[in-house]
Image (tube, rainbow, N blue to C red):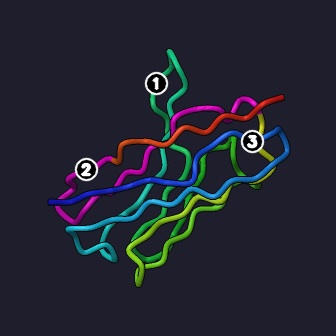
Amino acid sequence: QVQLVESGGGLVQAGGSLRLSCAASGTVFSMMTMSWYRQAPGKQRDLVARITSTGSTNYADSVKGRFTISRDNAKNTVYLQMNSLKPEDTANYYCNGQDWRNLNYWGQGTQVTVSS
């Protein structure tokens, strides 16, 4: 059974930084495309950043230059380094993994709150 467990959320002032982690188990992590999504209250869940099994990345325009997604296949973990945080980055952040069968798995989410 695939499990994704996020950590690293919290409360930070505008301009600050946080690093989110997502640890995977029950799968061949190195073969998965991993993504971070976020969802603010009353809004849809949107893609923030994605990293493929080969290390290719893409980002939402709103976070380009501020956020960095990376992965450590030896630790079965994907990271989201978030710098220069803004109040509009406040949301629940979800880790997503898509395997080679195009099956999707989700973590439980971690709250990020940025105060102005």
Q: Is residue 87 left or right of residue 39?
A: right
Judged from this view, the residue extending furthest toward the top is: 42
- Residue 78, how many percent across, how many down? 47, 66
The local secondary structure at tag 3 comes to: strand
- Which residue is labeled 1 in the image? 44
- Which residue is labeled 3 in the image? 12
Distance between the Cα atoms at labels 2 and 3? 30 Å
Q: Is residue 97 left or right of residue 19?
A: left
Q: Amino acid at mark 1?
A: Gln
Q: What stretch of residues is rendered in magenta? A: 87-106
Judged from this view, the residue extending furthest toward the front is: 11
Distance between the Cα atoms at labels 1 and 3? 23 Å
The answer to whether marks 1 and 3 mark residues whose Cβ atoms lie closer than 8 Å is no
Q: Is residue 30 left or right of residue 43?
A: left
Residue count near mark 2 (Cα–Cα under 10 Å), binned few <14, some 14–19, many ≥20: some
The answer to whether marks 2 and 3 mark residues whose Cβ atoms lie closer than 8 Å is no
Distance between the Cα atoms at labels 1 and 2? 17 Å
- Which residue is labeled 2 in the image? 104
Q: Is residue 32 magenta?
A: no
Q: Is residue 92 magenta?
A: yes
Q: Is residue 44 above or below residue 48?
A: above
Q: Amino acid at mark 3?
A: Val
- Residue 109, how many percent across, how many down? 43, 42
Earlier in the chain: of badge 1 and badge 3, it is 3
Earlier in the chain: of badge 2 and badge 3, it is 3
The local secondary structure at tag 1 comes to: loop
- Residue 3, how many percent across, how many down? 26, 57
Count of residue discs: 3
Locate the N terminus by quadrant: bottom left
